[in-house]
Amino acid sequence: MPSEKVLDLKKQQVAALKTRLDESIAGVVVDYKGISVEDDTKLRKELREAGVEYTVVKNTILKRAIDGTALEGMGSVLEGTTAIATSTDDYVAAARILQKYADNSKTFSLKSGYLDDEVISLEKLQSLAKLPSREILLATVLSAFNAPIAAFARAVQAIIDKDGEEAAPAAE
């Protein structure tokens, strides 16, 4: 039987993880088996730079944190080695970074994920990972908005240039 001190520590871990899950908009659960220390360090750095919190977690702690919540459906994948990546402001960063790493690894794999307190399928998670970054999406939208304005400006400039040619007397 675990001591009272150990039980209190585990209760604190569950509460902290539950709070983290509640505050996040997206998360990915992975099987981190077979990752080297060097690769893990690079992965954590890339996730941290993207604003993603990544931690290795015991399956029982995560199961207790999702019990009775909308994320309870992830409980079925909580076997083996488990880590969770959560983001409070970017829906695709964790999925994109972790999927990129999983594509180059034989043992590291995505298990499950969620968006806005809704568990999503592995297929949706992998599709999400293929989306471009937020900055690229914004740039694409802005260029689409800018294209008609730029075409109009070129047309007006062409009219001005044409009128300028007709007004200038031909020098012979």
Image: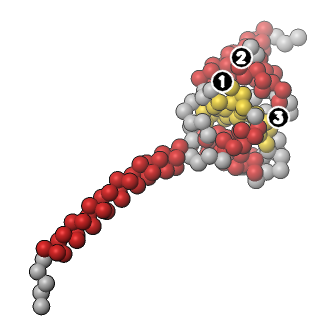
| Circle 1/circle 2 CB separation < 8 Å | yes
Picture coordinates of residue 128, whole percent (x, y): 66, 41
Q: Quadrant of the N terminus?
A: top right
On the image, the x and y values in percent for residue 14 come to: 72, 18
Question: Which disc number belongs to residue 81?
Answer: 3
**Gap between marks 1 and 2, in whole Å?**
8 Å
Residue lying at the far right in this picture: please name it.
1
Instruction: Using the image as rendered, state which of residue 156 and residue 66 is in the foreground.
Output: 156
Can you tell which quarter of the image residue 12 is in?
A: top right
Q: Dot 2 surroundings within 10 Å: few (below 14), some, or many (20 or more)?
A: few
What SS does tag 2 mark?
A: loop
Q: Is residue 3 above or below residue 88?
A: above
Q: Is residue 77 above or below residue 103?
A: above
Residue at the image position 70 percent from the left and 49 percent from the top: 100
Quadrant showing the C terminus: bottom left
User: Looking at the picture, how far across and down is residue 47, in whole percent?
Assistant: 62, 41
Q: Residue at x 62, y 46 (%)?
A: 131
- The type of residue carrying mark 3 is Thr
The residue type indicated by label 2 comes to Thr
Relative to 2, residue 140 above or below: below
Q: Which dot marks residue 69?
A: 2
**Along the line of sight, the residue nearer the viewer: 41 or 46:** 46
Q: Which mark is residue 64?
A: none
Q: Is residue 56 visible?
A: no
